[in-house]
């Protein structure tokens, strides 16, 4: 809450997740905290957090209610340290203040809650909060390691727990019908960080940061203040998807610049790379099923403070052609230059009705519908009867011919989750397909609103446990059970470390004149199907999911006998007799007849480059491919 905690590599002075950016470290900033998941204290619970930073002035926050939401600025009498928060009533029940100041390792301090301190709280549902409300010399806090034992999270423990600041934030919004209410419609005026974020739940590209009104900047801002006129990642703040009704009206109060592009209407709603002088600043209406911006409103005024405030709205007449469509409202910043930023101070929403149980399944992209524990228990009304037949029509529309469902299976440890997070920010790999999914054997948060889907398998080759082949069998059974592939022409499994360009694959498949109605798979590297990409037609996917168990019995001699690509190719070709095509080789790697200098990622005909295991290497390859 408050500021965006950023990772700072150890430079001999600062290190770890830091409560402010470096230029603002000793200046006044939004009061801030970094909060853990809620868990239940047991007799085995031990908590220890390794920190750097200053000491603050306040000795303790024990007994105080948590009111840190980014609205107030830090001050000279603030607190720097760790606090234990009762998740039910929002009160800090224990705290540890930092007491040492120094640079580098000399400033390290371990803040710990031991058995005696935690004994009074056994059975209590709590969170661990890193708190920074102090401004002054060394007015920052960072964490670069922690030890946690016996923090047990089980569904039964959370019946009465507020997992966030919901109870406090709810009173901040005016006339809000929040997702916790029984109503399924957003009707009201949404203000403050929590109010705006209750509707605009997904940020893509940059982290939209809450800036208290300082006479110039204010509201939820697309960049942090030091970067406001510099090049930054192209960015979108996206609402929940909802069905447009005849009474729907959207109005957003903004500050910032104007941008150069007048409209994004008709553009694919995917921003890749960094902002430039030709970009757009404004709001856009996005068709969820086709991922196209169907209307846009550009900012047209520049000024400081309230002089630059401008209301961008979609009125009833603007929305009339889109009644019945499933849409999102996107705040878009793809511009860099003077006043190269945008912020939202207030949103007036009427008739934005959303109900995950009744939205069309095609609209349920992982980055659109937030998977939150509080929503899983929310009782919602059914959609208005007038929209039922409209939803049925939307369900029948489906995706266009040639559409792709892309997925990845990742290990929960190592570099793969971080690579997926980078791909989400850049819009690369599976996130550039018509629909995507991520599978793992643990529930992981990849990006805001993007989580893995859990399958109960092991990712290791271990003769004493389930084999790795069991993972492939369970994975393809899960693909079939989810049924998403049936809405698409092509199904693509991508390795997390493959720099995959979906638009090139779509073009290559179309150019090869492959019939989507055929039962076939694509050799992604002559003369064999290669691991970075597995490309199947819809019918081949159905055949594979039905016969994968038979293939495992006939082909696999041991738990580590075949990799996924070898297993799938042998299964399709020798057991299931599915046709293969060599018309479109699509991947480049060292073992795939790669041209000289392929690691530069500049050949424009290549669909996927592999492998790139580091974030920097992946980013540079993607940037070169896009250039």
Image: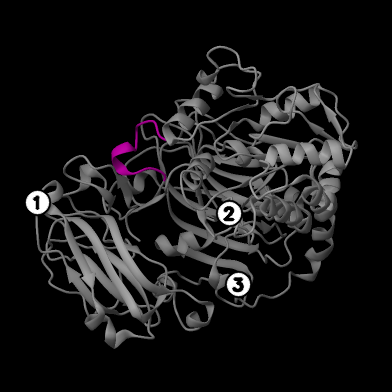
On the image, the x and y values in percent for residue 259 come to: 46, 32
Q: Is residue 574 visible?
A: yes
How was this image coloured?
one colour
- Per the rendered image, the range of residues in magenta is 222-232
Do the residues under discs 1 and 2 have CB atoms within 8 angstroms? no
Residue plotted at (28% across, 50% down): 16
SS at mark 1 in the image? loop
Say left or right for 147 vs 559. left
User: Which quarter of the image is occupied by the N terminus?
Assistant: bottom left
Say left or right for 600 vs 137. right
| 530, 207: nearer the viewer | 530
Q: Residues within 10 Å of mark 2 (few under 14, many from 20)?
A: few
Residue plotted at (50% across, 65% down): 189
Give the answer, above or below, for where 140 lies relative to 116. above
Give the residue at the far top of this rendering: 596
On the image, the x and y values in percent for residue 301 come to: 43, 38
Disc 1 to disc 2, C-alpha distance? 47 Å
Q: Residues within 10 Å of mark 1 (few under 14, many from 20)?
A: some
Main SS, magenta region, reads: loop
Task: Give the number of callouts.
Answer: 3
Residue to which mark 3 is pinned: 376
Disc 3 to disc 2, C-alpha distance? 36 Å
Whichever of labels 1 and 2 marks the residue nearer the N terminus, that label is 1
On the image, the x and y values in percent for residue 273 come to: 49, 31
Of circles 3 and 1, the one toward us is 1
Disc 3 to disc 1, C-alpha distance? 46 Å
Residue to which mark 2 is pinned: 462
Please say whether residue 228 is one of the residues in the magenta stretch: yes
Residue to which mark 1 is pinned: 102
Do the residues under discs 3 and 1 have CB atoms within 8 angstroms? no
Give the answer, above or below, for where 270 lies relative to 383. above
């Amino acid at each position: 809450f408050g500021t965006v905690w950023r990772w700072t590599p150890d430079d001999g002075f600062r290190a770890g997740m830091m409560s402010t950016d470096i230029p603002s470290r000793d200046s006044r900033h939004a009061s801030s905290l970094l909060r853990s998941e809620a868990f239940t204290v047991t007799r085995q619970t031990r908590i220890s957090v390794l920190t750097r930073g200053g000491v603050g002035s306040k000795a303790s926050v024990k007994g105080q209610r948590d009111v840190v939401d980014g609205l107030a600025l830090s001050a000279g009498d603030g607190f720097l340290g760790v606090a234990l928060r009762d998740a039910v009533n929002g009160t800090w029940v224990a705290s540890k203040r930092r007491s040492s100041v120094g640079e580098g390792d000399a400033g390290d301090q371990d803040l710990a809650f031991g058995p005696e301190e935690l004994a009074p709280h056994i059975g209590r549902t709590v969170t661990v909060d890193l708190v920074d409300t102090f401004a002054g010399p060394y007015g920052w806090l960072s964490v670069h390691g922690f030890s946690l034992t016996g923090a047990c999270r089980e569904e039964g423990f959370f019946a009465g727990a507020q997992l966030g600041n919901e109870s406090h934030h709810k009173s901040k919004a005016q006339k809000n019908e929040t997702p916790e209410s029984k109503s399924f419609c957003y009707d009201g005026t949404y203000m403050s960080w929590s109010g705006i974020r209750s509707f605009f739940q997904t940020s893509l590209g940059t982290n939209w940061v809450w800036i208290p009104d300082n006479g110039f900047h204010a509201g939820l801002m697309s960049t942090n203040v030091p970067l406001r006129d510099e090049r930054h990642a192209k960015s979108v703040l996206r609402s929940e998807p909802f069905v447009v009704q005849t009474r729907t009206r959207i109005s957003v109060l903004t500050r910032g610049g104007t941008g150069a592009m007048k409209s994004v209407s008709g553009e694919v709603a995917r921003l890749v790379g960094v902002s430039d002088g030709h970009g757009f600043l404004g709001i856009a209406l996005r068709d969820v099923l086709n991922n196209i911006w169907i209307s846009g409103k550009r900012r047209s005024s520049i000024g400081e403070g309230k002089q630059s405030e401008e209301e961008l709205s979609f009125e009833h007449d603007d929305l009339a052609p889109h009644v019945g469509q499933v849409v999102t409202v996107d705040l878009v910043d793809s511009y860099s230059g003077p006043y190269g930023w945008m912020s939202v101070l207030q949103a007036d929403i009427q008739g934005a009705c959303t109900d995950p149980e009744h939205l069309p399944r095609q609209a349920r992209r992982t980055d659109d519908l937030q998977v939150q524990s509080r929503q899983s228990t929310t009782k919602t009304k059914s959609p208005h009867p007038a929209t039922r037949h409209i939803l049925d029509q939307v369900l029948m529309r489906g995706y266009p011919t040639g559409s792709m469902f892309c997925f990845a299976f990742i290990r929960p440890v190592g570099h793969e989750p971080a690579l997926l997070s980078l791909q989400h920010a850049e819009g690369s790999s599976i996130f550039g397909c018509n629909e995507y999914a991520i599978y793992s054997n643990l529930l992981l948060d990849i990006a805001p609103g993007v989580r893995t889907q859990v399958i109960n398998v092991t990712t290791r080759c271990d003769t004493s446990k389930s084999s790795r082949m069991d993972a492939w069998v369970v994975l393809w059974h899960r693909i079939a059970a989810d049924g998403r592939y049936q809405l698409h022409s092509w199904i693509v499994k991508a390795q997390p470390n493959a720099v995959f360009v979906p638009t090139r694959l779509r073009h290559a498949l179309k150019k090869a004149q492959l019939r989507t109605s055929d039962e076939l798979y694509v050799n992604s590297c002559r003369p064999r199907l290669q691991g970075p990409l597995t490309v199947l037609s819809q019918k081949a996917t159905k055949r594979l999911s039905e016969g994968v168990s038979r293939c495992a019995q006939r082909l696999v001699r041991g738990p580590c006998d075949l990799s996924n690509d070898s297993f799938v190719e042998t299964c399709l070709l020798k057991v299931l007799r599915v046709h293969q095509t060599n018309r479109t080789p699509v991947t480049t790697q060292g073992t795939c007849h790669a041209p000289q200098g392929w690691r530069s990622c500049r050949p424009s005909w290549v669909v996927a480059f592999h492998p790139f295991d580091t974030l920097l290497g992946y980013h540079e390859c993607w940037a070169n491919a896009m250039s």
